[in-house]
Amino acid sequence: DTGVSQNPRHKITKRGQNVTFRCDPISEHNRLYWYRQTLGQGPEFLTYFQNEAQLEKSRLLSDRFSAERPKGSFSTLEIQRTEQGDSAMYLCASSLAGDRRFFGPGTRLTVL
Amino acid sequence: KNEVEQSPQNLTAQEGEFITINCSYSVGISALHWLQQHPGGGIVSLFMLSSGKKKHGRLIATINIQEKHSSLHITASHPRDSAVYICAVRSSRGYGGSQGNLIFGKGTKLSVKP
C-alpha cells in the first residue's frame, strides 16, 4: 500500500455511458498525475495537477475526458460517452515537487 | 522509434543471479524513474535519478546522461523480484514548459526461477 487510493478498483460499463473515477493522493503531496495503461504496454501520461491547477494535458485526452482536483486534494477523472477503446487501467500517482511518484492500485475499466 | 527503449523485453533468471535491465532514451531529460509493476497492476517507484548512481538494498540504478542510458541492476535475485520493470523519463521540454509528463518504456518482464 503506497498511500494512494483509487476507487472503484474495477468498472464495467456499456458503450456510451459516462464513468467517473476517484483518486485520493498522499495528503501532503501537491502533485497528482493520471495515466492510462493498456495490456502489454507501459503507462501513458494523461494529465497532471499541481494543487488544484491542471498544468498539463496530453493529446491523448480527448474532449470526452475531463479531470478535476477542486480543493487540491482528491481528484476525479470523468469519461463521457465511453468507447470500447477506452478500456484500460487508469492509474493515479502523487508526489511532492521534484520527488518520486507514488502510484495507486489503478481502476480497471472495461467498456462493453 | 520509441523515445524510451528498454532491453531485454523479457528476462528469465535463476535465483541468485545478477540481473541487468537497460534503458536508452532519445530526448533531453531532467530525471529518470525506475518503476516496478507486479501482476495485478500495482506500481512501485524504485528510484528517481538525474545523475550518477543510487542503491537501495539489492537494487542499484545508474545513469549516464551523456550516453542517454540507464541500467537497473538486481544482485542476488529472488523469485519475489519477478515483475515488470519500467523505465520512465521526465522530458526537460514538457508541454508548455511544464514537467509533469513522464515518457514510459514498454517494460522488461523479469521472471526469477527458484
Image: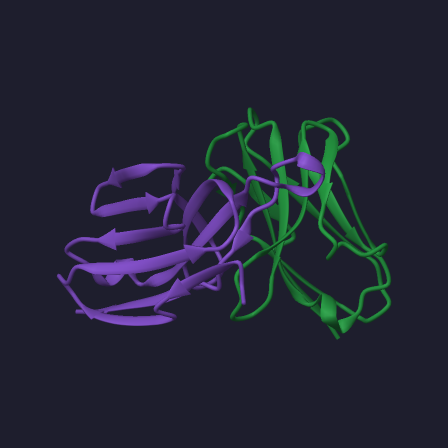
Chain colours: A green, B purple
Report whether residue A1 is seen.
no
Report whether residue B55 is seen.
yes
Determine the residue positioned at 16% across, 65% down. Answer: B15
Q: Look at the image and tell me in which quarter the C terminus of chain A lies.
A: bottom right
Where residue A5 appears, as percent x and y from the top left, is 57, 43
Q: Is residue B62 or residue B107 the one in the foreground?
A: B62
Determine the residue positioned at 71% across, 50% down. Answer: A58
Extreme residue in the top direction:
A28
Determine the residue positioned at 25% across, 45% down. Answer: B60
Q: Quadrant of residue A93?
A: top right
Q: Is residue A78 or residue A61 the one in the foreground?
A: A61
Extreme residue in the bottom direction:
A112
Image: A96 above or below A3: above
Determine the residue positioned at 36% across, 62% down. Answer: B83
Q: Is residue B15 left or right of residue B33?
A: left
Q: Is residue A36 left or right of residue A59?
A: left
Where residue B95 appears, as percent x and y from the top left, is 69, 42
Where residue B111 appears, as percent x and y from the top left, is 29, 69
Q: Is residue A93 left or right of residue B24?
A: right
Extreme residue in the front direction:
B66
Q: Quadrant of residue A10?
A: bottom right
Q: Look at the image and tell me in which quarter the N terminus of chain A lies.
A: top left
